[in-house]
Amino acid sequence: MTYDDLPLFSNSTASDKLALEWQKCKAKHPGLLLQLAGLARELKTAGHSRYSMDGLFHILRWETRTSTGDLGLKINNNYTAFAARDLMDQYPDLRGFFKLREQKRRGNFGQMS
């Protein structure tokens, strides 16, 4: 074990961890982006020029509540930025539909994670 293996000295950031968790979420729910794209296209057809990914997450949870047998799809709200970027990258017709902020790397400044 080296110092780099210890959380205090780790170069990984909270956003790196979230990005990895987002990748795992997409692997667990392979149709997720397609479902989100479908909802976004419906809203676009209805006249919306922009919409929030957070709103789409909530709609998707509502629409899946009966198929999951509980409160709907379990998806972390912290993934909205990743989902919006992935959706606009993979579906050119949705580029610009979500407002994005510049992602800033955040250091852990020695906090234990």
Image: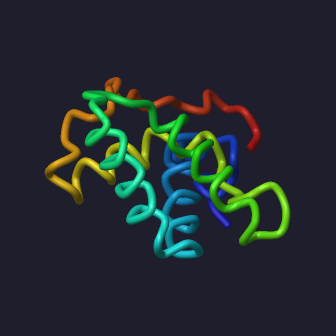
Q: Residue furthest front?
A: 46
Is residue 104 or residue 43 the one in the foreground? 43
Res. 65 image quadrant: bottom right
Please give the name of the residue rendered at 56% of the width and 49% of the height, measured from the top-left corner. 18
- Residue 48 versus residue 88 in the image, above or below: above
Residue 101 position in % (x across, y down): 35, 24
Residue 67 occupies quadrant:
bottom right
In terms of depth relative to the viewer, which is nearer, 19 or 69?
69
- At 46% from the left edge and 72% from the top edge, which residue is drawn? 31
On the image, the x and y values in percent for residue 113 come to 74, 44
Residue nearest the viewer, comparing 101 with 108:
101
* Total residue callouts: 0
Query: Could you say which quadrant of the image residue 72 lies in?
Result: bottom right
Q: Residue at x 58, y 58 (%)?
A: 21
Above/below status of 18 relative to 55: below
User: Could you say which is closer to the camera, residue 55 or residue 43?
Assistant: 43
**Residue 100 at x, y = what percent?**
33, 28
Left or right: residue 16 versus residue 99 is: right
Q: Residue at x 30, y 29 (%)?
A: 48
Residue lying at the far left in this picture: please name it: 92
The colouring scheme, among rainbow, by chain, secondary structure or one colour, is: rainbow
Position of the N terminus, as image quadrant, is: bottom right
Q: Is residue 75 left or right of residue 53?
A: right
Q: Horizontal and vertical percent for residue 77?
A: 62, 41
